[in-house]
Amino acid sequence: MSAAEDGASLSRLSLNQITVDQWTLPEVVDGCVRAGITTIAPWRERVAEVGLPVAARLIADAGLRVSSLCRGGFFPAASASERRRADDENRRAVDEAAALGTDVLVLVCGPPVDRDLAHARAEIAAGIERLVPYAAEHGVRLGVEPLHPMMIAERSAIVTLGEALDLALRFDADEVGVVIDVYHVWWDPALEREIARAAGRTIGFHVSDWLVPTADLLQGRGMMGDGIIDVPRIRQLVDANGYEGPIEVEVINRDLWRLRGEELVALTRERFAVHV
Amino acid sequence: MSAAEDGASLSRLSLNQITVDQWTLPEVVDGCVRAGITTIAPWRERVAEVGLPVAARLIADAGLRVSSLCRGGFFPAASASERRRADDENRRAVDEAAALGTDVLVLVCGPPVDRDLAHARAEIAAGIERLVPYAAEHGVRLGVEPLHPMMIAERSAIVTLGEALDLALRFDADEVGVVIDVYHVWWDPALEREIARAAGRTIGFHVSDWLVPTADLLQGRGMMGDGIIDVPRIRQLVDANGYEGPIEVEVINRDLWRLRGEELVALTRERFAVHV
């Protein structure tokens, strides 16, 4: 089988906005249309730059689909008032997802606020529980994304697919699912088993690569093919669990942000065809 | 209960040599004697600097115990000749452990040589299997140390305590055990269960701390108390599984290596009493 036959179809490619962080949202929309990319995943702060109504209209007028909105979450709070602010923020994120026409809000669950990791995890579960009714009312599913354990102190106390899935399984399948990002899960010896267990609960799939060496814990991801993740194998496991949705390319890399946007989009398309 | 009553007894402190990497082995031996630290954990390259017989005599004459030798491992090999070289090196590490008077050789199992992580893990299991008879003959137990998943591409394809333990359990308890380092395992949602499961198999326990932010994936560890790991909780879990051996302080941090050695040893003692 050739690489092209084996690779994921380009029709499944969704461009996560942060991959082309040198572009504003209107530039991403234009760039995708010109490159024949049909699906995007915007970030909230880039939506806010142009305003939600403008962003929604731009995307709709361009005929693009939205695979997910990035992101809600950050549940652990140091005080009751912080917790209320986070809840408000998360409801706004649900509103924005609905307005942008996607039914998936990605949750980056947030770091612990102190040394009590078990408490942070309990707060995350409680926060999701508070958000679910509002999200369900608005037709938005919550996608719990486990992040790489190295990001635990800055981004997420949920660090394995197994625990993300255990969290999701407390709720109905049309309310909460998991988002599988190869960068965050590829190291996990339980990966094959957990991806199989995520059948019917996988509502997002993200790709990038692990560079060697990795110089930056947060912004050092690579373009597929530049690192050592066996992306096609993980894609096949996710395929086998029944996920047929968009595959987001989410590469967070300062060096790539120095390229011209068009160049980076062309590279993304090319790598997706061969290395996903 | 006061911190002093709750903390680990200083008699359990073992100084891992890399914590005071500004010192040669003779300097570490002297420094420990002066500070009343009874146990050390040398690294092979620092032993080689003075030669094995000199190192063994220095340590014995000073009346120090050796908690472990760091390190063997690095099993995945790109070719048969590389594999033979690694096997030879690992047998030499066993010889050195025995000569230095410790019965624990720490294994850092090595990174994958390509994208095939499953193959790397199989090679690690096979490598341990080849080494076990030689180590057993020399009265040396092999301590499989799972490393943090962010070190997978540089140091170890074994990244969870669960998989380290599964590896160890293929062998007799007096042949292969696990080494639990808080820095490598603290993020794991299965930690409590896996530490309990490691009862009778824990042959080393290492402490340091996770700094926020962590600027360096390999050399950015903190001194206990400077980060967000709940070290006493993990120590209590390890106590509860029955481990009564030395607790190695293994802080790998460039900034601390700029201190005078005496100062760093004093800090280590002080932090151990309060934060372990």
Image: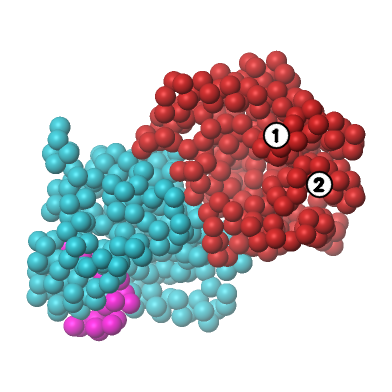
Chain colours: A red, B cyan
Query: Chain for mark 2?
Result: A
Q: Which residue is mark 2?
A: A27
What's the magenta region? B39-54
Q: Quadrant of residue A179?
A: top right
Furthest residue toward front = A50
Q: Position of residue B143 (x, y in %)?
A: 34, 60
Residue annotated with mark 1: A48
- Report which quarter residue A92 is drawn in: top right
> Mark 2 is on which residue type?
Glu
Residue in the image at 14% along x and 66% along y: B32
**One can see residue A166 in this view:** no
Q: Earlier in the sequence, mark 2 or mark 1?
A: 2
Q: Is residue B211 above or below residue A78?
A: below
Helix, strand or loop at disc 1?
A: helix
Q: Is residue B41 magenta?
A: yes
Left or right of B119 in this view: B89: left
Mark 2 to mark 1 CA distance (whole Å): 14 Å
